[in-house]
Image (cartoon, grey):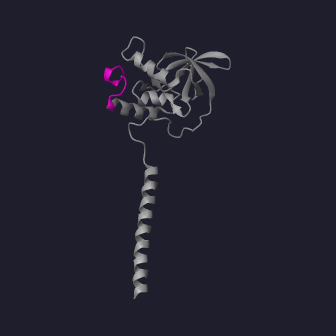
Amino acid sequence: MADRLTYAAITRLHRRITARVALVLIIVLLAGCTQSSPDSSPTRAPNSPLNPMGDTATVTRIIDGDTVDVRLNDQTLRVRYIGMNTPERDEPCYNEATAANAALVRGKDVTLVRDVSNTDQYGRLLRYVYVGDVFVNAELVAEGYAESRHYPPDTAYASYFDSLEASAKSAGLGCHPTGVFR
Protein backbone atom coordinates (compact mmCIF):
# COMPACT_ATOMS: atom_id res chain seq x y z
CA MET A 1 0.00 0.00 0.00
CA ALA A 2 2.83 2.39 0.83
CA ASP A 3 4.33 1.84 -2.65
CA ARG A 4 0.99 2.76 -4.28
CA LEU A 5 0.68 5.99 -2.29
CA THR A 6 4.20 6.96 -3.10
CA TYR A 7 3.67 6.18 -6.76
CA ALA A 8 0.36 8.10 -6.80
CA ALA A 9 1.94 11.09 -5.04
CA ILE A 10 4.85 11.10 -7.45
CA THR A 11 2.46 10.88 -10.42
CA ARG A 12 0.41 13.86 -9.17
CA LEU A 13 3.55 15.89 -8.55
CA HIS A 14 4.85 15.03 -12.02
CA ARG A 15 1.58 16.13 -13.63
CA ARG A 16 1.60 19.44 -11.73
CA ILE A 17 5.19 20.17 -12.72
CA THR A 18 4.51 19.22 -16.35
CA ALA A 19 1.43 21.48 -16.43
CA ARG A 20 3.36 24.41 -14.95
CA VAL A 21 6.27 23.97 -17.36
CA ALA A 22 3.82 23.81 -20.26
CA LEU A 23 2.08 26.97 -19.03
CA VAL A 24 5.39 28.83 -18.76
CA LEU A 25 6.37 27.74 -22.28
CA ILE A 26 3.04 28.89 -23.67
CA ILE A 27 3.40 32.29 -21.99
CA VAL A 28 6.93 32.70 -23.32
CA LEU A 29 5.88 31.74 -26.83
CA LEU A 30 2.88 34.07 -26.79
CA ALA A 31 5.00 36.94 -25.48
CA GLY A 32 7.27 36.54 -28.48
CA CYS A 33 4.29 36.82 -30.83
CA THR A 34 2.86 40.08 -29.54
CA GLN A 35 3.08 43.22 -31.60
CA SER A 36 4.82 46.28 -30.28
CA SER A 37 2.67 48.73 -28.41
CA PRO A 38 1.13 51.56 -30.41
CA ASP A 39 3.38 54.12 -28.72
CA SER A 40 6.60 52.31 -29.59
CA SER A 41 8.62 53.84 -32.39
CA PRO A 42 8.56 52.13 -35.74
CA THR A 43 12.06 51.52 -36.89
CA ARG A 44 11.56 49.42 -39.97
CA ALA A 45 8.91 49.26 -42.61
CA PRO A 46 7.07 46.02 -43.29
CA ASN A 47 9.15 43.74 -45.52
CA SER A 48 12.11 46.09 -45.16
CA PRO A 49 15.47 44.35 -44.85
CA LEU A 50 17.31 44.56 -41.53
CA ASN A 51 20.34 45.93 -43.35
CA PRO A 52 18.89 47.86 -46.28
CA MET A 53 20.91 47.93 -49.46
CA GLY A 54 21.87 51.40 -50.60
CA ASP A 55 24.59 53.99 -50.56
CA THR A 56 26.27 54.90 -47.29
CA ALA A 57 26.77 58.62 -46.75
CA THR A 58 27.44 61.00 -43.87
CA VAL A 59 24.96 63.75 -43.05
CA THR A 60 26.80 67.08 -43.15
CA ARG A 61 23.94 69.59 -42.89
CA ILE A 62 20.29 69.61 -41.89
CA ILE A 63 18.26 71.72 -44.32
CA ASP A 64 14.82 71.17 -42.81
CA GLY A 65 12.58 68.34 -41.62
CA ASP A 66 12.78 66.33 -44.84
CA THR A 67 15.99 67.43 -46.53
CA VAL A 68 19.68 67.02 -45.68
CA ASP A 69 23.07 67.42 -47.29
CA VAL A 70 25.29 64.34 -47.28
CA ARG A 71 28.86 63.50 -48.15
CA LEU A 72 28.84 60.62 -50.63
CA ASN A 73 31.87 59.51 -52.65
CA ASP A 74 33.68 62.79 -51.97
CA GLN A 75 30.70 64.84 -53.17
CA THR A 76 28.19 66.89 -51.21
CA LEU A 77 24.69 66.03 -52.36
CA ARG A 78 21.25 67.19 -51.26
CA VAL A 79 18.79 64.43 -50.30
CA ARG A 80 15.01 64.83 -50.13
CA TYR A 81 13.22 62.13 -48.11
CA ILE A 82 10.64 60.15 -50.09
CA GLY A 83 7.01 59.64 -49.12
CA MET A 84 6.60 62.38 -46.57
CA ASN A 85 6.55 66.13 -46.15
CA THR A 86 7.37 68.45 -43.25
CA PRO A 87 6.37 72.08 -42.61
CA GLU A 88 8.13 74.74 -44.66
CA ARG A 89 10.15 77.61 -43.17
CA ASP A 90 7.14 79.97 -42.99
CA GLU A 91 4.76 77.38 -41.48
CA PRO A 92 3.98 76.38 -37.89
CA CYS A 93 6.14 73.57 -36.48
CA TYR A 94 9.00 74.10 -38.97
CA ASN A 95 11.60 74.38 -36.20
CA GLU A 96 10.27 71.34 -34.34
CA ALA A 97 10.26 69.16 -37.47
CA THR A 98 13.75 70.30 -38.39
CA ALA A 99 14.98 69.55 -34.86
CA ALA A 100 13.36 66.09 -34.94
CA ASN A 101 15.15 65.31 -38.20
CA ALA A 102 18.44 66.62 -36.81
CA ALA A 103 18.09 64.46 -33.69
CA LEU A 104 17.84 61.38 -35.89
CA VAL A 105 20.54 62.05 -38.49
CA ARG A 106 22.90 64.97 -37.65
CA GLY A 107 26.51 63.89 -38.26
CA LYS A 108 25.54 60.24 -38.66
CA ASP A 109 26.25 57.70 -41.33
CA VAL A 110 23.03 56.94 -43.18
CA THR A 111 21.97 54.40 -45.76
CA LEU A 112 20.23 55.97 -48.74
CA VAL A 113 17.77 53.68 -50.51
CA ARG A 114 16.30 54.54 -53.89
CA ASP A 115 12.70 53.77 -54.89
CA VAL A 116 12.05 54.45 -58.59
CA SER A 117 13.23 58.01 -59.26
CA ASN A 118 16.80 59.11 -58.75
CA THR A 119 16.30 62.88 -58.44
CA ASP A 120 13.50 65.45 -58.33
CA GLN A 121 13.07 68.58 -60.48
CA TYR A 122 15.49 70.45 -58.20
CA GLY A 123 18.29 67.91 -58.63
CA ARG A 124 17.94 66.50 -55.09
CA LEU A 125 18.43 62.77 -54.59
CA LEU A 126 15.13 61.11 -53.63
CA ARG A 127 15.74 58.47 -50.98
CA TYR A 128 14.47 56.47 -48.05
CA VAL A 129 16.93 57.14 -45.23
CA TYR A 130 18.09 54.72 -42.54
CA VAL A 131 20.33 55.22 -39.53
CA GLY A 132 21.24 51.67 -38.59
CA ASP A 133 17.88 49.93 -38.51
CA VAL A 134 15.89 53.14 -37.87
CA PHE A 135 13.80 54.07 -40.90
CA VAL A 136 14.04 57.86 -40.62
CA ASN A 137 11.21 58.71 -43.05
CA ALA A 138 8.83 56.45 -41.11
CA GLU A 139 10.04 57.70 -37.74
CA LEU A 140 9.31 61.33 -38.60
CA VAL A 141 5.80 60.45 -39.78
CA ALA A 142 5.15 58.26 -36.72
CA GLU A 143 6.28 61.03 -34.36
CA GLY A 144 3.95 63.51 -36.09
CA TYR A 145 6.66 65.78 -37.49
CA ALA A 146 5.88 64.80 -41.09
CA GLU A 147 2.78 63.95 -43.05
CA SER A 148 2.52 61.11 -45.52
CA ARG A 149 2.70 62.34 -49.10
CA HIS A 150 2.46 60.28 -52.26
CA TYR A 151 4.90 61.28 -54.98
CA PRO A 152 4.40 58.75 -57.81
CA PRO A 153 6.18 56.70 -58.93
CA ASP A 154 8.05 56.59 -55.58
CA THR A 155 5.30 55.01 -53.46
CA ALA A 156 6.73 51.75 -52.11
CA TYR A 157 5.78 52.66 -48.52
CA ALA A 158 2.80 54.95 -49.15
CA SER A 159 0.22 52.84 -47.32
CA TYR A 160 2.63 52.25 -44.42
CA PHE A 161 3.25 56.00 -44.08
CA ASP A 162 -0.52 56.64 -44.31
CA SER A 163 -1.13 54.31 -41.35
CA LEU A 164 1.68 55.92 -39.33
CA GLU A 165 0.23 59.36 -40.02
CA ALA A 166 -3.27 58.29 -38.97
CA SER A 167 -1.90 57.01 -35.65
CA ALA A 168 0.16 60.16 -35.02
CA LYS A 169 -2.78 62.40 -35.90
CA SER A 170 -5.22 60.56 -33.63
CA ALA A 171 -2.68 60.73 -30.79
CA GLY A 172 -2.05 64.45 -31.38
CA LEU A 173 1.68 63.94 -31.82
CA GLY A 174 4.28 66.36 -33.12
CA CYS A 175 2.93 69.00 -35.50
CA HIS A 176 -0.62 67.64 -35.80
CA PRO A 177 -2.09 69.89 -33.07
CA THR A 178 -0.97 72.97 -35.05
CA GLY A 179 -3.18 72.06 -38.04
CA VAL A 180 -0.25 72.55 -40.42
CA PHE A 181 -0.90 69.27 -42.25
CA ARG A 182 -3.74 68.98 -44.78
Judge from the rendering whether residue 77 lies leftward or rightward of residue 156; answer left or right.
right
Q: Which residue is located at x 51 percent, y 31 percent?
A: 135
Residue name at image x 59 percent, y 36 percent: 51
Q: Residue 158: image x %, image y %?
A: 47, 32
Residue at the extreme top = 90
Magenta residues span 171-181
Q: Is residue 113 visible?
A: no
Q: Does the magenta portion include 32?
A: no
The image position of residue 154, as x and y in percent, is 53, 28
Left or right: 143 with respect to 134? Answer: left
Figure quadrant of the C terminus: top left
Q: The N terminus appears in which quarter of the rendering? A: bottom left
Image coords of residue 130 (percent x, y)? 55, 29
Vertical arrangement, residue 150 with respect to residue 163, above or below: above
Q: Horizontal and vertical percent for residue 153?
A: 53, 28
- At horizontal 62% and vertical 30% (from top left) the residue drawn is 54
Q: Place residue 19 in its image quadrant.
A: bottom left
Q: Is residue 60 visible?
A: yes
